[in-house]
Image (cartoon, rainbow, N blue to C red):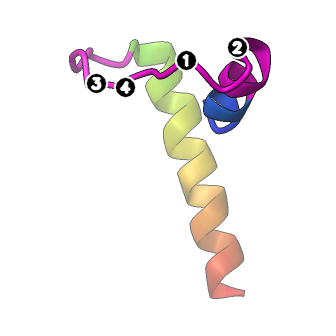
Amino acid sequence: MPTHARDLRSITGGRANFHVEFGHYEEVPPNLVEKVLAANEREEEKETV
């Protein structure tokens, strides 16, 4: 997403526009919750060192 605007302008010769809009929230599957929490714990440990 960060380079989408630049890429779109490049492809269309600067004539195109786009609009981003929030769609919806969705519950995180349980198997991903564990991974996210573990990654968060690792980041917090790095910050305290």
Q: Looking at this view, is 19 or 36 the one in front?
A: 19
Label 4 – label 1 distance at C-alpha? 14 Å
Q: Position of residue 11 (x, y in %)?
A: 77, 14
Q: Is residue 22 magenta?
A: yes
Looking at the image, the residue that sits furthest to the left is 24
- Callout 3 secondary element: loop
Which stretch appears magenta?
7-28
Identity, as a three-letter code, of the amino acid under mark 4: Val
Q: Which disc number belongs to residue 45?
A: none
Identify the residue position indicated by label 2 in the image: 12
Q: Earlier in the sequence, mark 4 or mark 2?
A: 2
Label 3 – label 2 distance at C-alpha? 22 Å
Q: Nearer the viewer, mark 3 or mark 2?
A: 2
Marks 1 and 2: in contact by CB < 8 Å? yes
Residue at image coords 78%, 24%: 10
Q: Position of residue 6 (x, y in %)?
A: 70, 34
Marks 3 and 4: in contact by CB < 8 Å? yes
Relative horizontal placement of residue 33, taking residue 23 as reference (left or right): right
Identity, as a three-letter code, of the amino acid under mark 2: Thr
Relative horizontal placement of residue 35, taking residue 19 as reference (left or right): right
Identify the residue position indicated by label 1 in the image: 16
- Callout 1 secondary element: loop
Residue at image coords 40%, 16%: 30
Quarter of the rendering occupied by the C terminus: bottom right
Q: Nearer the viewer, mark 4 or mark 1?
A: 1
Q: Which disc number belongs to residue 20?
A: 4
Q: How would you rate the neighbour count of disc 4 (Cα within 10 Å): few for under 14, some for 14-19, many for 20 or more?
A: few
Identify the residue position indicated by label 3 in the image: 21
Residue at image coords 64%, 63%: 43
Picture quadrant of residue 35: top right
Q: How would you rate the neighbour count of disc 1 (Cα within 10 Å): few for under 14, some for 14-19, many for 20 or more?
A: few
Magenta portion: prevailing SS class: loop
